[in-house]
Amino acid sequence: MVLIDLYTGLRIGELCGLKWSDFGRDKEYFDIHRIIERLKIQWAENRSDYQRISLISAQPNSSTALYIGTPKTEQGKRRIYTSSQAVLGFERIESYQKNNETYRENGFVFLQRNGNPYEPKAYNDLYRDVLKCADVDYRNFHTLRHTFATRAYELAFDIPTLSEILGHAQKSTTENMYGHSLDDTKKKAMTKFNRGFL
């Protein structure tokens, strides 16, 4: 998930909701159709836009449950084209699931050992443990999304394209969040005048 998020910039709920059936041929792209969230049952059961996920070993008296929902905005429903690094990550996960007989064509990409899909909090806990084992200071998982966006700016992605990839409802959101990166790029560009070619 870490590797894939660094190359796609997805929100954690979008990653958790990703299914193999969302992919195009050869994993050239995938579509974002859903998110996974843990919600209060009393609230979510009255909403037609949320579908409860049956979990293995679920707590019977819990006040919350895991739900599939749709992205918050229309822009959140989008197509993400994949880099070769992301494809390699997905292929490794697919191979692992097939070897362990947990792969399903319409199944979730990210599964826990018990077969349940990951939920954002559970994955965030695992992510924290991975950082600790790697002796890396903790950074929120959402930081990976910011890293992707900053690197995309440095690679000269234009704002409308990056905004669509990130699923921002407004292009101004992208510009406001990552404008500092654009400033750094402009500073580097202006140092070319230091070569004295005028």
Image (cartoon, rainbow, N blue to C red):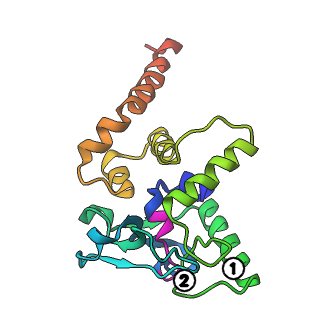
Could you tell me which secondary element the residue under label 2 belongs to?
loop
Quadrant for the C terminus in the image: top left
Q: Residue at x 51, y 86 (%)?
A: 106
Is residue 144 covered in magenta?
A: no
What residue is shown at x 76% (from left), y 83% (from top)? Answer: 99
The segment highlighted magenta reads 14-21
- Nearest the viewer among 52 and 3 is 52
In this view, 169 is above or below 175: below
Determine crowd level at label 2: few under 14, some 14-19, many 20+ residues with C-alpha closer than 10 A. Answer: some
- Near mark 1 (Cα within 10 A), the count class, few <14, some 14-19 or many ≥20, is some
Left of 77 or right of it: where is 197?
Answer: right
Q: Position of residue 8 (x, y in %)?
A: 50, 57
Instruction: Compare residues 84 and 129 and report the one nearer the observer.
Output: 129
- As shown in the figure, which amino acid type bears the numbered disc 2? Gly
x then y, percent, for residue 37? 41, 65
Vertical order, 147 against 112 (above or below)? above
Q: Position of 87 compared to 67: left or right?
A: right
Q: Secondary structure at mark 1?
A: helix
The N terminus lies in which quarter of the figure?
Answer: bottom right
In the visual, does 126 lie left or right of 148? right
Marks 2 and 1: CB-CB under 8 Å?
A: yes
**Circle 1 residue:** 97
The quarter of the picture where residue 122 lies is bottom right
Residue that carries the numbered disc 2 in the rendered image: 107
**Marks 2/1: CA distance?**
10 Å
Looking at the image, which residue is at 39% across and 26% down? 183
